[in-house]
Amino acid sequence: MIDHNLIASATGSRGENLNGTLTVGQNLNSRRYRSLSGQGEGLIAPVPLAIENTVSQTGLEFKSLRHIESYFGQGELNLYNQLYLSAGVRNDGFSTFGASQRRHNFYKASAAWTVSNLLDGGDQTGLLSFAKLRAAYGETGREPDVYAALNALSTIVQFGSGYGDALKSSIGGVPGITSSTRFGNPALRPELQREVEFGGDFGFLNQKADLSVVGYNKKSSDVILPITVNSGSTGFLSAFQNAGALSNKGVELTLNVRPFTTQNLAWEVGVQYGRNKGNVTNLGGAEIFDLLEGFGASEAEGADVLGYAPGVIIGTAFVHCGRGTQSTVPGIAGGLVSQDIDALCAATPGGYKNGALFLAPNGLPITDPQVRVLGDPHPRYTMSYTSSLKIRNRVTLSGLLDVRKGGDVYNGTRGALYVFGTHVDTDRRSTQGQYGVNYDTKRYPDVAGPGAGVVGLKTPQDWENWMSIVGTGGGFSGPSEQFMEDGSFAKLRELSLTFSLDQPFVKNLTGFSSLDFRVSGRDLKTWTNYRGVDPEVNNAGSEYLTQGLDWFANPQTRSFVISFSLNR
Amino acid sequence: MIKLRYLVTLAAVLMATSCKSDFLTGGDLSTDPNRPSAATANQLFAGAEAAIWALLGSDPARVTGMWSRQFAGGQNQYQSIYNYVYDEGVQSGFNAGLYAAGGLIDIVHAQQIAKDEKNFALLGILQVQEAITMGTGADLFGNLVYSEALSGVPNPKLDDQLVVYDSVQKVLTAAIANMATTDVTNSPPSAADLVYFGDTNLWTELAHTLKARFYMHTAEQRPGAYAQALAEAQQGISSDGGNYFGAFTSNAAEQNFYFQFEGPAGRAGYLIADPQFVALLASRNDPRRVEYFNAAGTRLSAARLAPDFPQPFVTYDENTLIWAEAAYRTGDQVTALAKLNEERANHGLTAEAVAGQVLLNEILIEKYIADFQLGHEAWNDFKRACTPNFAPTQAGQKMPGRMYYDPNERLTNTNIPPAGQGFNGSRNPDDPPNAVSDGTGQACLAG
């Protein structure tokens, strides 16, 4: 990478109460990337670990070059040492866009007013010892993946199924070329993120307590997504488009209180509260954008869905009343003719509640072939409590408690264990099970349809069939909906005790000025109704957009740390 | 203020120079150094061949092979699919694959190149590729986006299944005409064609057999199609040497799909022999009992599981038996019996001397046996004729007669109804379940 910056700035002032800075500059950036890798598969002899000692080898190469050319200018103004204003503009040119979309302007502005400097001259005392109000607006633009605006053919497309069988386009030494499966789009524009933030920082009682309040509204538009396109119409599976729009609105509150701050006893307690509401407002005409993080759309998978937060979990569900579903029903018309489910629900003696679980005449629910949103893995809010107690500057006891309210988790582990017959729930096979009465009633309290009142699971064999590898009540071929759970929890994230020794004898004995001894434990205790090992697990990995997919994943580890440190 | 003026001047100079320079274009900035930007018609033809072999040799063939009870599902997803438990994922991407890379988009691209080069022999061959692709699509999914395919219009309309077959017939007619031309600019692919090495006579025979095959798929709705199929079969594949097959090799990602599924893909035990089919072969003392399956009758034979097994997709046997059935259906039992015995002789079986209903039953059962692993052809025949009259794997249910469309195609096209509704169901209105088995006249058990 070569990065070149040319910046010039000017400062000026009119008396003591007016200071200003003006900056302009140019930025040239060139990023060249080249990767060459060789991979050998299947060792011939156990050693050596060398490419030549493998059965088959593959080589991979990727090259790219990207340039950015930007110009920017920014002005700052400081008025009466309490009001700070700034504004800026930036013009970016990206080589990764098509010819018509190379250059774009982005603006930003901010204002901050330290109110307390006006009130008391900034000595930070009194009931309201500090107060600052701030507001900011900023725009950023993101470029697409390299070569996303270009169209080219492919030599690497393979044909086969998701089971792992695949055929190259060049067979028997005959060169074969195909189109790429993704359409390159020369009309791409930068992804634009606009953020408005308002906030306030306050100190109380001679700074014994401080409170920070932030509210934000981030709107991303023209989000570049490799959106699924209709292959029949286009001949491509996907295309980069400025398709997405999403918003994130939220508040963050932080309160810290320091009741004692003496030499002998210092105690600080803090509470943080965060709440974010995401909403996907546009997917370029599509309703669902599959993030391909999970187990396939017929199982549980992460997706962006119109009207939901980004990264919800989609998958299959049971047929429910009130959704306008048409489906064949085993036991009615030979299971051959599509039935109006809502009409069957309405015919239930006593009527039905909207969303009630539909039961076929055999007393068991049936699968809805339509992929639906099953849950939102994002919490309704998070809170954390911190506390730290320091005694005589020698002993410190501190702790952190995390609370998450809401957030759905797909407990695929439970679904699989049903099939294997090793989950504790399968222990009831010698008793009878009836949906809406004594089986899975927490998830499905209301039932309707011709099977309401019918005991669906009578014998151990019934249970086994229902939860078997081809059964509807198990994890492999049954709807994922039954394994969605509430992932709320409270976790004792950390507890630590530190002894510090800094008396003169320490220095005399060791030559170090102080000695710390610390014992801490992480993830010590979890309080949750989640039925898997840990509601925080995620198969996609926590860095991915989708959370809440649990499939035999490793939970957070509980750890204990003992440390000594010597300070000079 | 003086400082400020310098700054403005400096910025203006930078702006001016940047406009002249092309810091943002040229070289690897404007061309993808990882992908080719042009291809020859032969290269696109080779890519489309691989895509067709996957369409006929990969998951659709395995799934429909289970539904027609020649294979059984031994475990996991295949056990579910065998027992008619499946969802929109059952098409494994082959719905979109009809149009995308290796599909219609590349075939049409290659056809344009061939037209520009006045290479009508190649154009005809590429039209045969188009017909296999779209005709097979109609077999698997029913109604299809075809007349508005690749048009770029949002929500392209789906043509009725019978209309798709009509279009495919027209494409094949044009293909045969183009391959019959003698222009000096004609240059069929030779080394690039691993099946026929550019022999337009063999491609023309294939085109006739495909015409016969697709006419048969419409015969349930249009009885006149039998006579059309008969006329085409008479010009169809005339020996085993004319079979259309997948020219797989032993190299990685060039191997037969059944080998790959069991071996590299690690799916051994998923796809096993259906005892129903093994018993049928054994009861007839058919030598294909051990050609198809291992001695125990549990899985494919070693020969069929070889990585380089040249998997047949359209054969002389199929053509002979279409001829036999079409002759019978049009009232010529003499030719029907002769063609049945021609196919039997091709497998060392003795000639039969049967007539009437028994003759039809024998022809349909022979075809069920001969169509094993020919893509999804055994399933097509069964849907039409319900012969042999085997039981469904799920009592009281009919065998699935359609695959659901790709959910991505459905979600991006308002003309496709949700899975399980309208024509996106287990049957197409053009393809009703059978009331009786054509072979025996008894009530049809599975479809």
Image (cartoon, rainbow, N blue to C red):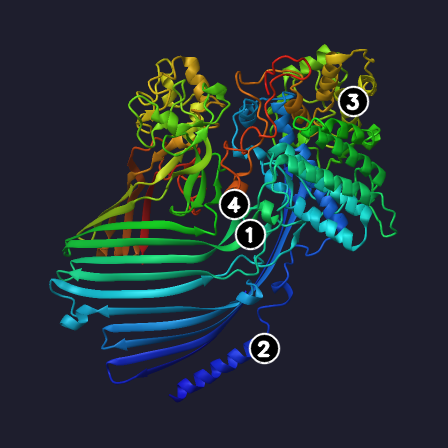
Give the amino acid type for the residue marked by disc 4 in the picture.
Answer: Thr
Q: Chain of mark 1?
A: A
Task: Provide residue B25's location: percent of width, then percent of height.
Answer: 60, 68
Give the amino acid type for the residue marked by disc 3 in the picture.
Answer: Ala
Rounded to the nearest angstrom, the CA distance separating label 3 from label 2 is: 77 Å
Have a look at marks 4 and 3 and say if they share a chain. Answer: yes
Q: Chain of mark 2?
A: B
Considering only order in the chain, which callout, 3 or 4, is on the residue closer to the N terminus? 3
Residue B327 is labelled as: 3
Give the amino acid type for the residue marked by disc 1 in the picture.
Answer: Ala
Rounded to the nearest angstrom, the CA distance separating label 4 from label 3 is: 44 Å
Q: According to the image, label 4 marks what residue?
A: B412
Which residue is nearer to you in this view: A317 or A168? A317
- Which callout, 4 or 1, points to the residue nearer the camera? 4
Task: Provide residue B298's location: percent of width, then percent of height.
Answer: 65, 18
Which residue is nearer to you in this view: B50 or A366? A366
Which residue is nearer to you in this view: A71 or A194? A194
